[in-house]
Image (cartoon, rainbow, N blue to C red):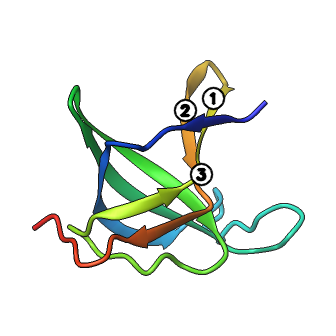
Amino acid sequence: MKLYVDTTGKQVTVSRGTEPKNDQNGNQRSEKGTGRLMWATQVFVLDETGGEVITITTAGEKPNVTVGQLVSVEQLEAIPWATNGRNGVAFRAVSLKPMSGASGK
């Protein structure tokens, strides 16, 4: 089952530039099945309840976004995980795109 996050009414701002999503050996990961390269972008998500920093993974072309820029997130998916006694939530999206004419600065 896929868990999608509704980003309506949330302000999403890039807080660290997009970087390759690397494996434990330092090699850039690729998407299973398609071979598309994976990217990690840290964002700050703000709504009426407060804010949170998350990292969103995308696959394919590197998102053309910059630090401080407001972005739109297409199909944000929350993926719970647990490994070796640790757990958390990973976030994945189809794309991150700059909001037209918007800047968080």
Q: Residues within 10 Å of mark 3 (few under 14, many from 20)?
A: some
- Other-residue count near label 2 (Cα within 10 Å), few / some / many at <14 / 14–19 / ≥20: few
Q: Earlier in the sequence, mark 3 or mark 1?
A: 3
Label 1 with label 2: CB-CB less than 8 Å:
yes
Q: Position of residue 14 (x, y in %)?
A: 30, 62
Q: Quadrant of the N terminus?
A: top right
Write down the residue under mark 2. 89
The residue shown at (56%, 57%) is 57
Q: Amino acid at mark 3?
A: Gln
* Residue at 20% from the left image edge and 31% from the top image edge: 48
Determine the secondary structure under disc 1. strand
Q: Work out whether 39 lies above or below 83.
A: below
**Quarter of the rendering containing residue 78:** top right
Q: Is residue 2 above or below residue 29?
A: above
Camera-nearest label, 2 or 3: 3
Look at mark 3 in the image and give the residue it sits on. 75
Nearest-to-viewer mark from 3 and 1 = 3
Residue annotated with mark 1: 80
Label 1 sits on what residue type?
A: Pro
Q: Residue 20 in the image: state x and y as whole percent.
A: 54, 71
Q: Are marks 3 and 1 in contact (CB under 8 Å)?
A: no
Give the Cα distance between marks 1 and 2. Answer: 4 Å
In the picture, the quarter occupied by the C terminus is bottom left
Residue 87: image location, x then y, percent? 57, 24
Separation (CA) of disc 2 from disc 3 = 16 Å
Give the left or right position of residue 4, taking residue 100 as reference. right
Task: Judge the density around disc 1: few (<14), some (14-19), many (≥20) Cα neighbours within 10 Å.
Answer: few
Between the residue at mark 3 and the residue at mark 1, the CA separation in whole angstroms equals 16 Å
Residue 65 is left or right of residue 33, and the answer is: left
